[in-house]
Amino acid sequence: QRLKPDATTSMVCGYCSTGCSLNVHLKDGQAVNLSPTTSYPVNLGMACPKGWEALTVLDAPDRATTPLLRNAAGRLAPVDWPTAMGEFVRRFQSIQRQHGPHSIAFLSTGQMPTEEMAFLGSLAKFGLGMLHGDGNTRQCMASAVVAYKQSFGFDSPPYSYADFEESDVLVFVGANPCLAHPIMWERVMRNRRSPEIVVIDPRATETAMAATQHLALAPKSDQTLFYGLARILIKNGWIDSRFINQSTAGFEQFWEFVQPFDLDRVVAETRLKASQIERLAETIHERGRSSFWWTMGVNQSHQGVRTAQSIINVALLTGNIGRPGTGANSITGQCNAMGSRLFSNTTGLLGGHDFTNAQHREKVAGVLGIDTATIPTENSLAYNEIMEGILRGKIKGLWVICTNPAHSWINQSSARDILDRLDFLVVQDMYHTTETAQRAHLVLPAAGWGEKEGTFINSERRIGVIKKVRKAPGQALADFQIFRLVAEAWGCGKMFSKWTSPAAVFESMKELSRGQPCDFSGVRDYAFLDERGGVQWPYPQEGGDDHPERRLFADGRFFHPDGRARFVFEEPRPMTELPSAQYPLLLLTGRGTASQWHTQTRTSKSAVLRKLYPEKPYVELNPGDAKRLAIVPNRWVTVSSQRGQMRALAVIAPTVAVGTVFIPMHYEATNRLTDAVFDPYSKQPSYKACAVRVSPD
Ligand code: SF4
């Protein structure tokens, strides 16, 4: 009875990029329970276990409730905010004086509201004089961003979730929405067009098991497959010539390029049957609307950008874009990866602008009322280059906000060694127990989702609102408030005098977006977003309501100056680490559950979510490999790579092919094994494939 709510509000969930809305039930202004919102156009009354448990994780006993400073004895000890801010400024400014302004950097996140990302990026670069800062979105979305920019002229996932229900053929590449995006999968299940569901994945994932076609190709051969598919489609005339002529550039060169990708070559490299490849081409041709969806299996690769573009090319040549049920559709991971892509001020200037473009710098300076000279004229180093900068002694101080690189960065032992070399590491997080916080010199206690305000942008470009429905514990503050304290303590508070609240920053964001493909200057305010169930960009001031479905490219015009999409292609590159005599198996990583999130920093705090997922690490092995290695089910084995090893329980199942094993990404030890290989264009790490050995304990 004590917890009987007296009011209800709604807000967007803070885990994945689906962007479900949750009704939060309040007692005396504090959240006491929640349920999925039935009227919201994204989730239509559904939520996954993480969403249902979103409030529980706020009550964890290891919440950071006070700033912590490492003392002379090497222990993190509580201090007050003035002391913490004093140390922040003294240590970082001392490093800058000694080693130059660019010797400090920041690493941010796709989990904070867009307003906080914009504040952090502006504060760090325009106020604190940093040049280098990147986000953990580098780990998940960078390849899609570069692919879209090169192919379409702007980072622009073109779809609406309605496309899940309006497709005749849904092709999922390196994607497992059953687990990774369960509510998106529910939208697929609502499709009444008897769709063909095609899964292209080396592993028999939960989604593959529900598919009508599963193409279990050799790891990292998807680029070759899509070139071969394009060749079949073009050769048979199964293309949309009108669309190609009116809306694309480079088709002739692409047709010439794919000539060598004949069926024999594609079969040899993908290890698929010719009939499987031909059937997929026929399916795309015969059924009306095909949509292509990809996630980390494509992006986290040594050739993620070109693989994404090999998918985009097939959508372009078949005219499967800009119409209901179509699209070359990258699904984002984190709740606000899309906000980060536009407003984190890391590798791109605020609002989808470019640091190297003088007009863009002028526009941003004008909107923010700052001196143009404070805006860097060059791009930041990428995440991996910041880590290398620390290793080489160029970067001495690091501010890590709302992410956990000591767990999540590739080749973990090396990453931890690199972080330990820093003269000053500041970690700003909800929990003081993360692997990165434990190495920090200073921990700043941050409020979490539900304890602060702002907006997220989901995978279909929908801007949704989050609200403060709980008081943060102890002295924890919203990241927004921490940034204000930093600005004042640093001495650049005047520059941010207009940044008084997330709502005030949202007004600036609207102006920054004006005239861009992502223009949402027609959104009045947060209440407007609430009333409309979120708003997809573009939503310009004039004609915002003209296109309620918000699918991009319906007019056949793309964002390049000539309005045409580009066919971008390149000879596939060999994998850098192949199985060897010493490490004869190939490790695949990915999501293992719908009930845990990434490094489990938040979701492991929920007893319900822990029950839904094995706490002990496990490795999936093919029965043939298990027999050969004398490994029996549910016994401990050691998995080793050139870089490290971990123990895991053996799960023996034909879900993985002979010669491959699978370990979920969520376990702390998984990245001891992974290899620091990066896509050359996006600098995204290739988490998905490296050589390992498995031995019984
Ligand atoms: Fe939250 Fe994603 Fe689950 Fe929806 S699917 S409830 S957005 S974690």
Image (cartoon, rainbow, N blue to C red):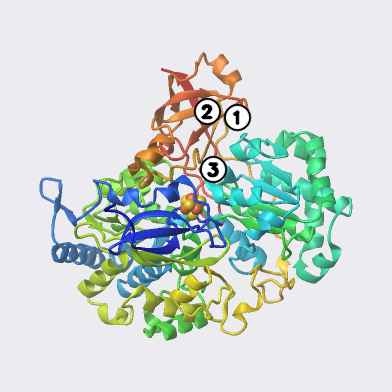
The CA distance from mark 3 to mark 2 is: 16 Å
Q: Amino acid at mark 3?
A: Leu
The CA distance from mark 1 to mark 3 is: 15 Å
Q: Earlier in the sequence, mark 3 or mark 2?
A: 3
Near-viewer residue (500 or 416)? 500
Q: Amino acid at mark 1?
A: Thr
Image location (x, y in percent) of residue 603 = 38, 45
Q: Earlier in the sequence, mark 1 or mark 3?
A: 3
Q: Is residue 186 left or right of residue 29?
A: right
Quick check: is the Cβ at mark 2 less than 8 Å away from ligand 1? no
Q: Are marks 1 and 3 in contact (CB under 8 Å)?
A: no
Tell which tag, 3 or 2, sits nearer the viewer.
Answer: 3
| Residue found at the very far front of the displayed protein | 1
The CA distance from mark 1 to mark 2 is: 8 Å
The circle on residue 655 is: 1
- Label 3 residue SS: helix
